[in-house]
Structures are given as C-alpha cells and as structure tokens.
Image (cartoon, coloured by chain):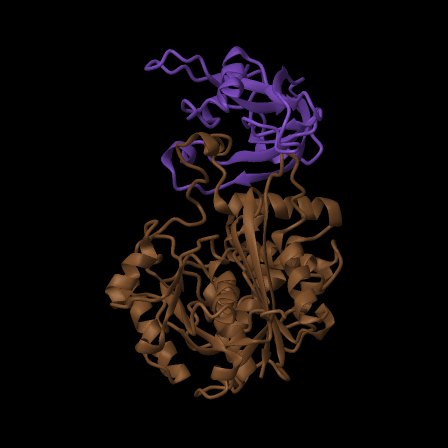
Amino acid sequence: MAKNQNDSSKNPTYGHPAIDWESRAYWEGAGRGELVLQRCRACGVVQHRPRGLCVSCLDGEIEHFVASGRGEVYTYSVVHQNQMSKFRNALPYVVAYVALEEGPQLLTNIVDCDPETVCIGMPVRVDFVPTPDESTGDLLGVPRFVPA
Amino acid sequence: MSYCGQFAIAGVHEYESRWSPDKTSFQIMGECTRDALADAGLSLSDVDGLFGASMTMGAMGMVQFAEYLNVKPRYLDGTNIGGSSFVSHVAHAGAAIHAGLCDVALIVYGSTAASDAMAIGTGNAGGRDPSAAFVSPYGMTLVSSYAMVARRHMHEFGTTSEQLADIAVSTRHHASLNPHAKMRQPITREDVLESRVIADPLHLLDCCIISDGGGAIIVTSLERARDLRQTPVAILGSGESVAHREIGAPDLMTMAARQSGEQAFAMAGLTPAQIDFCTIYDSFTITVLLTLENLGFCKAGEGGAFVENGGIGLGGRLPTNPDGGGLSSNHSGMRGIFLVIEAVRQLRGGLGERQVEGAEVALAHGTGGYLGLMHSGATLILKKD
C-alpha cells in the first residue's frame, strides 16, 4: 500500500467508526475494500451520506452499489495544528473533499504523498484501512484516498 | 403586515473584560443583563421573554439560567444554531413581540472560553456517533473546514493570501481604536503572512482570537422603545438559513448568507448599496470575504478586490467590524451577540475614533458552525429610528 518513499507510519490512524443501520452498508463495504454508495431506484439520485430514505423524492427504495473509487481533489487543507493526540502525531496531514466520478464528494484524507504536492484537480483513488471491531465481530474499514 | 419595522433594540451591553477566570458564565450573563436593562432604562421585572444560547450550557440551559436569575418569562427561546444564534434571536424576539407573546425580550450570552482553555478551532469536528462518523475519522478541525473553502476560492477566483490578510489588518486597526479589544497592537499584511500556518492556507492571524466575554440585548416594540432611555434601533429586515453538504455535492462557495441576506433585503426594501456599514461574523478572514460576496456587496469572485487595501476599513467603501471583530476584539466561542451590539452602538453614534461616519443603516450577519461542512446564517438590517 505504502508504495512511495514517504513515511506512511505518519499517516492518520483510524479507529472503528460508529455505525447505525443507515450507515452499516457503507462501513462494511469499506471493510471489504469497496466504496459503497446509495442510489434511489425511483428517481435515480445518488446520495451520500447514506440515509434510510431518498431525500430527493422522500419515496422510492434505496439500493447500494460499488463506486469506482476514482475521483479528483475538489479542495483540501494541510492541517498543521490539531489538539487531539491521535491527530497530532500525524501532523501535517491533508483533509480534503474528493469529488467522485459518480457525483458525491467525500470528506477524507489524502495519504501516501507529500502534503505539499496535493492540489485541486489531482486524480486520486480510494484506499482502505481495515478497522475490525473485536467486540462485535464487525469487519469494518475507513476509506481514504491516495494519488491515482 | 410584516413584523419588521415594528420592533427595536432598546438596550445593549457588551461585557468589558476579555479575561474572567474568577467569573462563571452565568455570572457574566447576569451582569450583562443588569447593564443592558440599565442602558434601556428598564428593570428585570419588565422582562417577560428570555432568549439565549451557549457552547457550554446543557440542553435545558436557558431553564437553568432562568432559575439562576430568578425570572419566570412567559416566552422562552433557547434555540442554538451556532454562533449566529443571537442574530436570529433578535428576529425571533421581534416575531414574539409582534404576536403579543411577550413585551420585553432579553437576549443574553456569557462564556469563559479563554480561561477554560477551550480548543475551539483546533479541536476535532464530529464525535463518536454514527452521523458524525463521516467526518470525525479524518481530523477536520474547525480551522481546516474554513481553510478548505479558502483554498477553493483561491482556485476558482485567484483570491490571494495577501487579500485575506488585509481583512485581518483592517480589523486590527479598528481594535486599536477600541479600548476593550483584546488585541490592540496594529499589524501589517506581512505580519499575517509570516504568522504560523494553522490549516493551510489560513495563518494564525487569519483566525479569530479566543476570549472570555458576554453580552445582552433588550428588544421591545418600536413604540415602547421610543419612550425609553436610548434612541431606538429598529429592525427593518431579517433572514435565516442553513447551508450543508446537500446530498453529497456541496457548493462551498454558496453560504447560508445568500438566502438569509436576500430575505432580509427584500423585507427591508433595501439593496446592499444602501448599507452604511456591516458587522459580519469574522471567525476567519475567509468568512468575511465570502459573506460579503454572498450578501451581494460584490459579485462572486470579487471579494478579494473588495476587501484589499482597507476596502472594509473605517473610511473604506464598506466599513466592517469597526469594533475589531472576532479577529481582534472579542470571540468567546459564539460571537453573534457582539455583531448586533456593535451595530446598535454605531447607529446610536458617538464612538469617537472608531465611529463610522454617517452610520444610519447597518447589516449584521452571523455564521454558525463549520463553513466547509454545515452552517447556519442569520441576517439583520438595522436602522436608527
């Protein structure tokens, strides 16, 4: 995964995400290495974050599908200060919105590259960090992005 | 008939100290209540509507504050939509007064954010709940949520760090004229650009300060306000809104201010050209620039040219935050109440060196929340009676 010369041990680390039944498919997908989005069978809208109903038509049946995982950086910031210790160890790190090919933008991190090389429009692809929950047996993961 | 033009601000007070380790937030709120009532020439027994919000009160905080102050209002509004709450409370109070649900509304705020060493900007967004799980893993601080908006604005429009810095420079100049401001030493554009980066492209001096503080506002009918101690400041227009990630594809250049501002201008029957000065929530320099664009003071993308070289300083095309704003005077977590208080003080006049010349009509706009995630906006248009 850490295919370049940068020190990936400095990437942000991720805990097990808090989930509920509306978001379970997304986080379980990430545990399998799939970026799972929602589409409304009635009106065809792709929505994110996942919800139990389509908020465009308030009707219809939601289906899940596996997105390409490709997109580009819509905007970003290199964070130089965070008071929380789990992030302090990863400074400086990149927070970004990635515009996916399917439309939605995801808030995420861009990792495995020098933060100074990140720019708007940069092509990226999804990457996953498994975060299994031993107490429940859930095999979840957290998506983040790397240069494509 | 619209409720606007029918009610007014009759009393205001801003807590003078920015560092109050020996006070509780309720004590600050109580003292501000006393002094705002004195400003209006009213007493606590006149108050029958209670409005407020804070970062630290619990869900029933305004009930607790009513107990603290030993009041039993007949109208209660503890709406918390972030730092803009108090701007919206003024409109809510006007609606309640217009409907006959209360006669004298107290809007109040107090905070010891600085002496509590609260990490407002560089803590972490989200928490351990499922709806926040799409945010909290990624270490998005409050500052970086605004920084991402600044970065996008630079990309789309060529806005520069120098232009953002000029907002901080103008605001600090205003603070230097305000004896109660926390940061009064004038700064230069270079000082801003050379201050350390907190979340690229925002530097330390692009960020608001953290202070202790508080304030109170007394709202009543325009008719009643005319019989009180101070010249009334009437509310001509109001609006509130939210902006968020929509269903996954946010337009980070469109703020809640667009919708709330359009409503407030329509209600007042005024245009941006008729506004003499503004108080705009300046959590960060980019907040001011983007709010000015969204309120229609300039076109999208022209904010940089609008603010640079003292454009929003005293004597500039649109003096903004003449008290020194949250960037330099007072930011104790939720700044909305100070926007209204300074607008009222300026419209009353007599502020000496920091007085906006010919101040007749003002616009106050509060933003609450995370600009790059979800936020609220509340706008008021105010006029000296």
Chain in purple, by letter, is A
Residue at (63, 15) in percent of width and height: A66
Question: Is B184 situated above or below B367?
Answer: below
> Which quadrant holds residue B145?
top right
Horizontal and vertical percent for residue B73? 34, 67
Question: Is any part of residue B354 visible from this angle?
Answer: no
Relative side of B190 to A72, left or right: left
Residue A50's image quarter? top right
Note whether B149 is above or below B265 in the view shown.
above
Q: Nearer the viewer, residue B225 or B54?
A: B225
Residue in view at x 63 percent, y 16 percent: A65
What is the quadrant of the C terminus of chain B in the image?
A: bottom right
Measured from the top left, where is residue B284 in percent x and y? 54, 55
Near-viewer residue (B314 or B26): B26
Give the image location of residue B60, x and y in percent.
32, 52
x, y percent for residue B340: 51, 70
Query: Which quadrant holds the N terminus of chain B?
Result: bottom right
In-front residue for pair B193/B38: B38
Q: Relative to residue B60, is residue B274 depicted above or below?
A: below
Which chain is assigned brown? B
Q: Does the rendering let one see residue A94?
A: yes
Image-based side of A120 in relation to B35, left or right: right
- In this view, A101 is above or below B291: above
Give the quarter of the image for residue A113.
Answer: top right
